[in-house]
Amino acid sequence: MAEQHKFYGQEEFSKGLEGVIACESKLGYIDGQKGWLIYRGIEIGDLAEHSTYEETAYLLLFGKLPTRKELDEFTQKLVNYRTIDPRVADIIKSMPPTAHPMALLRTAFSALGAYENPEKVDEFDLEAWTELGIKAISQMATVAAEVGRLRAGLPPVAPDPNLNHASDFFYMLTGKKPNELEADVMNKALILHADHGMNASTFTSMVVASSLSDIYSAITGGLSSLKGPLHGGANERTLKMFMEIGEPENAKAYIEDKLARKVKIMGMGHRVYKAYDPRAKILKSYAERLAKLSGNEKLYTISQEVEKVMIERLGKKGIFPNVDYYSGIVYHSLGIDSKMFTPIFAVSRVAGWVARVLEYLHSNRIFRPRAIYTGPLKAEYVPIDQRS
Amino acid sequence: MAEQHKFYGQEEFSKGLEGVIACESKLGYIDGQKGWLIYRGIEIGDLAEHSTYEETAYLLLFGKLPTRKELDEFTQKLVNYRTIDPRVADIIKSMPPTAHPMALLRTAFSALGAYENPEKVDEFDLEAWTELGIKAISQMATVAAEVGRLRAGLPPVAPDPNLNHASDFFYMLTGKKPNELEADVMNKALILHADHGMNASTFTSMVVASSLSDIYSAITGGLSSLKGPLHGGANERTLKMFMEIGEPENAKAYIEDKLARKVKIMGMGHRVYKAYDPRAKILKSYAERLAKLSGNEKLYTISQEVEKVMIERLGKKGIFPNVDYYSGIVYHSLGIDSKMFTPIFAVSRVAGWVARVLEYLHSNRIFRPRAIYTGPLKAEYVPIDQRS
């Protein structure tokens, strides 16, 4: 029997599949040592400076920057798809507004898949699924905004076809057309979060899609994973930490105490980055400006104190602020309820989910790893009255 | 730059993570060479012969066969949890009955998570999440049965606390109390499908849960994955194949033709099993009896012809019937719409999802593998009017 069970308890493995290769990809690359992130070869800083979310989504999906004609067509598709089935609002309203917004979004987005033509949704076809993916990218913004409105007891806001994707999302969520700065930062935030390697939600989407399930299932899987505090919930918790600290002069003692008790400091450090997260660098300047404009300067000052202490103490170990460290201050300064931070993340990341799923499906193989079995190889089925 | 990018395009990897270890587990083991499957050390044949789905779920969750007192308490919990929020039926009714039943189930089950107390659902706590897992195992049957009833234009059937889990599910789905044989085969079918290593849906559940999302998110992920034809849809497609063949004398030519064109034969072969799937062996005798009793003898005869040809041709290569080969005939002979086969799978497998998720969370690490980047390392952001 020993030979057949040769894997039994004898092998080493990497927990959480850290460092394990799951696939090839041409989508994006992170050099964690340098703090360097590219989408399709283009540095994230260049995209944040020059691009729009629409263009970046096109780049991720199709592997090149679009010509003006291609971008116009793509943008028009996104605009046309924005309006969603009114039954989605009814489904959201049928759930308690106190539920986690990601539970509402997961359910509402899943329902969208049921309204589509099953022949297009359920039968694997790269072309049809690419189109559904574009639709999903468009509609995630509408559904997330509806979740935000309805859970706050407010009526949904219809999309405005004259606004770009990021501005329209801001408008549907807040009911207010963004000013120039707001439009700029929302666009950048969506670009910066659109893709990030094989993170848990992207990987979930790919595992789901690998059974040739469908695009909506894949994205519902991504949403299910992103909901977790170890993934999408980090910026909300970081903001909460700044608020708990309360005053800049409390920061040092607060952090020293946490470090002494080996409690994780939110928004700091990343499995991949051992340098300053390039996305955090970009959001930092916006966090500063927006915090000042919105009377949240103290929060920003606290963030600076915490960052200083942390880098002094742990910078040598590669612990630096990650993107979640500053996105919370940014969104909070824009007047957005912190409960909606993770849905905003989804509005952006859906592009990465769709792009990586479609890329993987080009030469699909269903994901099925194995476990090392460490239980008993032989146990008797003991009749119930003889058990203890 | 070369050093930092040392992984760039240079490594081998296993597509679909085949053979890659994702975790340790004491839950179950498959020896694919021998066609041997155990749950917690107990052979699947012993469980199918002597156990109930309730007892098997307990075994998977808690690692031991329950005493009578433990089983009574566990069973009572499952019974108490069967009744679900009536708004779930409204959500199902709000979606088109023509949608894939797994799209309805995915959405309806996801909604259940939103009705729970967010403090219990969203904050990681092994004890609270174990209780929610038991609830989820119970309620999957009710939701799946409601999906089956409502999509067929029939009213839901309330659970009957006097029936065991498998019989009650059959009753809620069909509106008819099962006879002894029906109760027996439903119980066995649920036992046989309850767990099966690191299949794509189980793995999805684990990846989702590893962000500390929640039990409902994890199961919604599992459902999303199971929906795919490469995973949960195989028995439905196998049955369709038998029906297409139409007459036993067509079987040989049909299969030879498919093999010549390298088309996959449904219900045959398995990534793990290179011998006869032990679950298929058990279901085969039921398929035979039930097919005869229900006037589907011809389907069974066709299955025998196909099996004969396939084993002659590919048995040496380790291609044998898997569990999906016979479960379709069994369910069809019980009068169940083939569209509901995958939801039935979910009613069983939810026990494995919950058990493996809880086991993984005992010493959790978020899943984050990596991809080999094969795209360009440097691409310019070209202004839009200079692109081609």
Image (spheres, coloured by chain):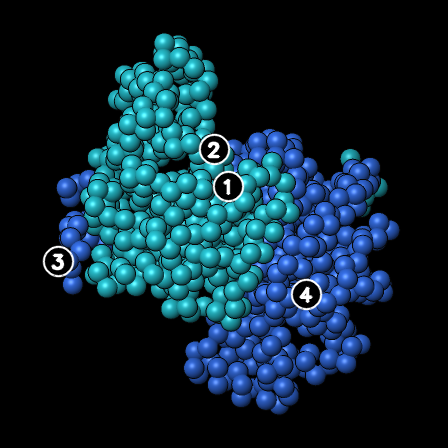
Chain colours: A blue, B cyan
Residue A230 percent coordinates (x, y): 51, 64
Chain letter belonging to callout 3: A
Residue A360 percent coordinates (x, y): 54, 39
Q: Nearer the viewer, residue A248 or B310?
A: B310
| CB atoms of marks 1 and 2 within 8 Å | yes
> Which quadrant, please, contains the C terminus of chain B?
top right
Q: Any mark on residue A151, and which?
A: 4
Using the numbered discs, state the Cα–Cα distance from disc 3 to disc 4 in whole angstroms: 54 Å
Which amino acid, mark 3? Gln
Mark 2 falls on what kind of element? loop
Which comes sooner in the sequence, label 1 or label 2? 1
Return the residue at label 2.
Answer: B337
Residue depicted at 45% across the width and 68% down the height: B124
Q: Quadrant of residue A328?
A: bottom right
Which comes sooner in the sequence, label 3 or label 4? 4
| CB atoms of marks 3 and 4 within 8 Å | no
> Are both tags, 4 and 2, on one chain?
no
Using the numbered discs, state the Cα–Cα distance from disc 4 to disc 2 in whole angstroms: 38 Å
Q: Any mark on residue A386, and which?
A: 3
Residue A159 visible here? yes
Mark 4 falls on what kind of element? helix
